[in-house]
């Protein structure tokens, strides 16, 4: 039997927003399972879905379309929602003993006993089957490509036990949609998608390093590794490098796909957002780190808006 959900302030997971929709409106019996799938922390959905949207939009720009196919965007949104939930559940199953020893994660459903291991496995399988159904809606090339990410996803939660670079493996897995969006439109994989993927991976290493600084003391005590521990006081120079490469690669991918002036102007604004993160980051302030991490949704939206605006203006002119 799972323990009853604790009451009051202790009922909220540490890094969830105080007024998230799950804790406010979801039926009490479903709350632990929605938390396990990270529905109370939607930032991960945006960070997973936005590279998919970029890729679909850039492939459509390559065809001189006025806008990306809404159906494809919907499929990728659903896929991102359920596969993010399945992936987080898998990670929590693997890390359940570790999470119980880390202040920020001990309130999660598995280590706190709100959800049983068996129930977590059932949830993971159910979400994965929905994700498979979404994947099978794409063309054959995209289906085969989508299956290729599974070994990386399976490896990810173990990397922090032997390497300081789990953020790099997360980047490889989390941005697979940047590769998939292009062939979902064109039926093939071209260099703009590869360059976009490389840039998105660097972006993820950067923002997840910021996120990892919240746990670096606990991680160090437990013998776990991360780029936050690897970079230490040199985090800002490393972020400047990673974000710089990410910005250049994403911009180059847009140019290779035929994007024009409006896209470039939008990318300047997006680049300023990344610069703001680096300049204002305080790695010793957990709330500052969490806020900068979450602000990457804004960067992703700015990139998407730059692509869409460029497409719309090109169609008119």
Image: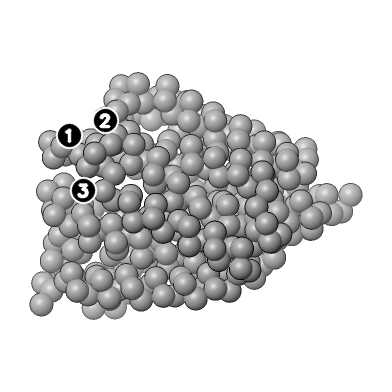
Vertical arrangement, residue 212 with respect to residue 229, above or below: below
Q: Is residue 262 left or right of residue 226?
A: right
Under tag 3, what secondary structure?
loop
Quarter of the image for residue 86 reads bottom left
Vertical arrangement, residue 248 with respect to residue 188, above or below: above
Give x and y (percent) for residue 72.
63, 67
Q: Residues within 10 Å of mark 1 (few under 14, many from 20)?
A: few
Residue pictured at 45% horizontal, 46% vertical: 172
Q: Residues within 10 Å of mark 2 (few under 14, many from 20)?
A: many
Residue on which disc 2 sits: 229
Residue on which disc 1 sits: 220
Residue pictured at 73% horizontal, 39% vertical: 255
Disc on the earlier residue, 1 or 3:
3
Tell me the CA gap for discs 2 and 1: 8 Å
Quarter of the image for residue 53 reads bottom right
Quarter of the image for residue 42 reads bottom left
In the foreground, 55 or 169:
169
Disc on the earlier residue, 2 or 3:
3
Under tag 2, what secondary structure?
helix
Give x and y (percent) for residue 278.
44, 28
């Amino acid at each position: 039997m799972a323990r009853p959900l604790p009451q009051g302030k202790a009922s909220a997971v540490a890094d969830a927003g105080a007024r998230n929709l799950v804790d406010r409106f979801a039926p009490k019996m479903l709350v632990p399972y929605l938390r396990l799938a990270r529905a109370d922390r939607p930032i991960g959905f945006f960070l997973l879905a936005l590279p998919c949207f970029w890729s679909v939009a850039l492939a459509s720009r390559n065809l001189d379309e006025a806008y990306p196919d809404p159906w494809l965007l919907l499929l990728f949104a659903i896929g991102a929602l359920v596969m993010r939930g399945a992936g987080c559940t898998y990670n929590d199953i693997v890390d359940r003993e570790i999470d119980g020893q880390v202040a920020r994660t001990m309130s999660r459903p598995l280590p706190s006993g709100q959800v049983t291991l068996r129930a977590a496995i059932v949830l993971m399988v159910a979400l994965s089957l929905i994700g498979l159904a979404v994947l099978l809606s794409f063309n054959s090339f995209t289906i085969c490509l989508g299956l290729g990410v599974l070994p990386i996803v399976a490896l990810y939660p173990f990397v922090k036990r032997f390497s300081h670079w789990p953020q790099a493996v997360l980047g490889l897995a989390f941005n697979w949609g940047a590769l998939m969006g292009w062939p979902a439109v064109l039926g093939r994989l071209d260099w703009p998608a590869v360059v976009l993927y490389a840039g998105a991976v660097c972006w993820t290493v950067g923002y997840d390093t910021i996120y990892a600084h919240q746990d670096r003391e606990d991680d160090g005590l437990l013998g776990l590794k991360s780029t936050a521990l690897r970079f230490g006081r040199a985090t800002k120079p490393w972020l400047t490098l990673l974000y710089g490469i990410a910005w250049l690669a994403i911009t180059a991918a847009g140019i290779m796909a035929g994007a024009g002036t409006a896209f470039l102007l939008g990318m300047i604004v997006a680049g300023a957002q990344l610069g703001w993160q680096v300049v204002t980051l305080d790695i010793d302030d957990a709330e500052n780190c969490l806020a900068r991490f979450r602000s990457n949704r804004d960067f992703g939206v700015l990139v998407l808006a730059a692509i869409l605006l460029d497409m719309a203006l090109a169609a008119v002119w």
